Amino acid sequence: MARAHWGCCPWLVLLCACAWGHPKAVDVGGQDVRNCSINPPYLPVTVVNTTVSLAALRQQMQTQNLSAYIIPDTDAHMNEYISQRDERRAWITGFTGSAGTAVVTMKKAAVWTDSRYWTQAERQMDCNWELHKEVGTTPIVTWLLTEIPAGERVGFDPFLLSIDTWESYDLALQGSDRHLVSITTNLVDLVWGSERPPVSNQPIYALQEAFTGSTWQEKVSGVRSQMQKHQKAPTAILLSALEETAWLFNLRASDIPYNPFFYSYALLTDSSIRLFANKSRFSSETLTYLNSSCTGPMCVQIEDYSQVRDSIQAYALGDVRIWIGTSYTTYGIYEVIPKEKLVTDTYSPVMITKAVKNSKEQALLKASHVRDAVAVIRYLVWLEKNVPKGTVDEFSGAELVDKFRGEEQFSSGPSFETISASGLNAALPHYSPTRELNRKLSSDEMYLLDSGGQYWDGTTDITRTVHWGTPSAFQKEAYTRVLIGNIDLSMLIFPAATSGRMVEAFARRALWDVGLNYGHGTGHGIGNFLCVHEWPVGFQSNNIVMAKGMFTSIEPGYYKDGEFGIRLEDVALVIEAKTKYPGSYLTFEVVSFVPYDRNLIDVSLLSPEHLQYLNRYYQTIREKVGPELQKRQLLEEFQWLQQHTEPLSARAPDPASWASVLVVSTLAILDWSV
Amino acid sequence: MARAHWGCCPWLVLLCACAWGHPKAVDVGGQDVRNCSINPPYLPVTVVNTTVSLAALRQQMQTQNLSAYIIPDTDAHMNEYISQRDERRAWITGFTGSAGTAVVTMKKAAVWTDSRYWTQAERQMDCNWELHKEVGTTPIVTWLLTEIPAGERVGFDPFLLSIDTWESYDLALQGSDRHLVSITTNLVDLVWGSERPPVSNQPIYALQEAFTGSTWQEKVSGVRSQMQKHQKAPTAILLSALEETAWLFNLRASDIPYNPFFYSYALLTDSSIRLFANKSRFSSETLTYLNSSCTGPMCVQIEDYSQVRDSIQAYALGDVRIWIGTSYTTYGIYEVIPKEKLVTDTYSPVMITKAVKNSKEQALLKASHVRDAVAVIRYLVWLEKNVPKGTVDEFSGAELVDKFRGEEQFSSGPSFETISASGLNAALPHYSPTRELNRKLSSDEMYLLDSGGQYWDGTTDITRTVHWGTPSAFQKEAYTRVLIGNIDLSMLIFPAATSGRMVEAFARRALWDVGLNYGHGTGHGIGNFLCVHEWPVGFQSNNIVMAKGMFTSIEPGYYKDGEFGIRLEDVALVIEAKTKYPGSYLTFEVVSFVPYDRNLIDVSLLSPEHLQYLNRYYQTIREKVGPELQKRQLLEEFQWLQQHTEPLSARAPDPASWASVLVVSTLAILDWSV
């Protein structure tokens, strides 16, 4: 799914807000927004009264001698999704959008968010709050400099700022005589008090061995050997990202929506393994699995989650060097380690190692995609029958596809909130229907479904766009060009260690050719029952280079504001390419197994190579998914699959493009005759 | 030309050294290298005795209380080519390669250079010098830490280190208790004394108005308006790159090989223009042209070149902010400006403005390329007649093409040292023949010519690869795939403000498809009688985004070690693309007008689109260059041109690829019939 590209990952918000420009606010539920310029102000019922909590927060600020307090939209692990108890910005402001920073001074309170959320913010915030339509630290600091006098203090929770974000605040404030003050007790939490949702107490469980690529002991040994080989001789690795601890120990839980993680940190040395988590959540079997009763180099000592900062600080007193990945480490940890004792990389060795899946992990991930295809195909078949009746809406559709996935073996829920968008809604960069606000599906418009599942063996993410009636020529052209982009990138052969950024334009060229484009990224890593956006694999500029064994989504799109949206997303494995001349080259093997919509493909735009690729892909789908459908007695679905994977060939030319069609058919015939 | 990608520009050396790996040292003149491990050492006659000068340098170091002294390969303006008087590293070491840093301690002397130069260094350096086969500051600092004790001082000339290079030395030495000491008097110069080549005293002249895009007054006003609009309100712009002063004032000279520049700096404020240069080199006409007799805001006050550091330091005492481009500013200037008074960008506004050529500059540049094509075609026709006689060698060939260019109107010499390389020599990343060392041209092997001219109206740079006999199937395939890469990138349509790095893979895909690639960049900016590599335009990661009016080379290649080399380079103008749907899109218009070698094109590999593009390009060549050849009565050349620009069409299929050829011919026929 492409959602993260336009918002969920902190480092992408700015990029995507810019890339998308300022799309027209298409609001499915009308524009019932606040009006603070009249007296008394007009406040819709959706607004939250924040007067009391703001007063309480200012009291806490006074206690700390602060003139301003920053409230970001993050948690202590830079998670893409945060749990309710971490939704401090939403709680104090009333504004529940997933991106936005609040700052409170003694006199004012303000929120900075991007264009996707402006209407939502005006519907949810009362007049205590200014809305600033910008993002990034610069406008916030500019505002702070006018609002608070020199010599005063700006407070923040160091566990909620990444090192980079802290640095940008620090740099922007340098020389201004305003002082950035790290306060480890979160002031919003003090105000929130007992109303704040509690910590999850769901068990932290070990994945069955059938679903893991290696044992935790093997993983620990591998990471230690990287530490030993490192030029700067780190004595420990500190892991802050929840996907790191989940992966390393093969442990899972459900602390975060959509991501099977548990709040934790780990400190790994040559002689010890310390896992900071809530011990009461481990069963005795899991404690045994972790060898937690001993203290040797292969025993996981569990220490309390809340002790991590003190423990790291104490460890850093010794003659040590702590290796961290700066992308996922917060200032709260960073500030207690002397700079000369830090060994920094953008990503920790665990993130880098995890990015490459071994053959068992690859097989697991592929298997989950076969079952996922069954669920999606069941849904598409159901839609084909029910949409013409006029009884399906975006929300009930989303619920149904989630239900079908839930019925698949090893299912553990959706991997993100299903994007089920009909007609113009599919052009919105950040849309999910609700029970209250949704649109009916219709044979007269396109429908975009971007959804995925968490399974014990793998995470899936697939987007298909369909039309059950008569699409316009432009819709068919746009769809086909998106498809060509998907194919061009999927079949590209490129040198090992090429960065995704260098090749992602192949997914755009067919669109560029006629002056079309899309404003989001082209893909993200994905893996085995972790988060759906498994960075740093992908096609973004901060992603690591491609290597055999990585999985990435490939998801070009096209969006026509106020009309329709198209996205075609598959997950692909990076494999070795066999080239005519010897060399170390890679290509992709697509492991999503749902056919595209034939009704939207303009075959005359496809080259013989595209047709050949597509028909080979369809053959693979038949081989992988066909038997699975038969096994389940899903015969209607099996028929549908056969129909939708019939080999495509160039059709009778339409007068305007007879020349190219003639060529295509010539080659197609030649090709079949081989 | 691609040379800079593998060596001339300091920031590319490392990249390219890595990309090329360690090619086998193919030495056309044998391996007569020093042997310091025997007693007495064996020293070939090419070695320079450095004992006396080294002793004198160490005496100077002692005077300054230095334990080590760094001698880089740069000048004070980060020029790609440096004048003889700046070749300090070459003079003190004997090693004349264009890339390499020397460090001298009281006991040892060492040179760090990349694989292209190892043999040359062993042939030119005596046994006073260690050769280190690495590049970058890290290995130098690692060595320094073992060679000099804590507490001691490492000297350097601050005018020879870019800000970035200084920072990397500084960072690497931090905490080591070795102190980096900036010494403005160059110690090698003190030893070199009166033997050091003098400063150029050639006149600095104004370009005729016919050859400039705008007057210097218009340019100064444009730059000032950028200063006024700048958020950080700089009070002055400091220009350190020689191409900046040459462009801004429309002045030229010949202080640097191949680049028509003069040693200078400029400090531009709202109320004054200060040009630091050698006043005696301006004629009275030029002084009048510069309004140098007054002191108003539109009068150029000429101050002595040697005063620049003191003058900047004095200016920086005021309430000022100085805007610099860090890429071309040395530490010698940087260290005298307090950090809070600096406004820094990677490139100065002059570099950014200069990158986009206005319509007059575009017309001038195109005109120079038509005449340049005449010179290259004359040479190719001459080669076709003379190579079979066995009388042509690489060096005499290079001389002849330089001579033909010299006969063209407005010629001002070659724009770089002509790369004239036959057979296996063309696979060497850094090859130019000499009178003594060269290879005979033959109908049995490929020949690569990468050359360009400086003309008052424009700079040219073109590479053609030819074969007069029977190329192998592999040579034809590789050539055709390089050609396809050139065409695929040249005809690409892409959104405005796309960075070159994001699209350069289109020039590689046809090679990647079969496991081939090239190890250098894909192109560089070029312009009107400035340097041949006019950064920051191009396809490198540090280049600025593409905009209408920029010129860049497009130069994919393929190199088979020990056998042959192929490169096809054209200069292209970035123009607006007309797309089917409205949008801001760009594409390229090729302005190099020399046909490719038909003898090396395997038509069966070309798509109908490639053929169509190629034939349209050939038609343009006929229209542009044909009349010019006729006007000059170059009738043989005119005939050759007609022959070599005959429309290409798919040929009789060879059995192996008859299918695709059939299609190509079908389309080709259809295309002609439209």
Image (tube, coloured by chain):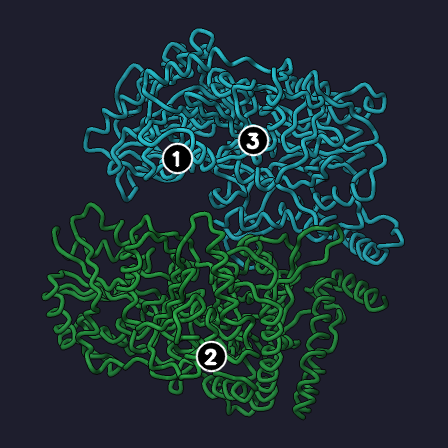
Chain colours: A green, B cyan
Tell me whether circle 3 and circle 2 mark residues in contact (CB < 8 Å): no
Tag 1: amino acid: Tyr
Quarter location, residue A91: bottom left
Q: Residue at x 39, y 55 (%)?
A: A235
Residue that carries the numbered disc 3 in the rendered image? B365
Q: For numbered disc 3, what is the local secondary structure? A: helix
The disc label shown at residue A206, or none: 2
Q: Residue at x 55, y 37 (%)?
A: B524
Q: Are marks 3 and 2 on the same chain?
A: no
- Judging depth in this view, the residue of B180 and B604 nearest the camera is B180
Residue that carries the numbered disc 1 in the rendered image? B169
Q: Is residue B583 above or below residue B347?
A: below
Query: Label 2: how many residues lie within 10 Å, few (<14), some (14-19) or many (20+)?
Result: many
Disc 1/disc 3 C-alpha distance (Å):
41 Å
Q: For numbered disc 2, what is the local secondary structure? A: strand
Quadrant into which the C terminus of chain A falls: bottom right
Look at discs 1 and 3 and give the one toward the viewer.
1
Tag 2: amino acid: Ala
Disc 3/disc 2 C-alpha distance (Å):
68 Å
- Judging depth in this view, the residue of A343 and B575 nearest the camera is A343
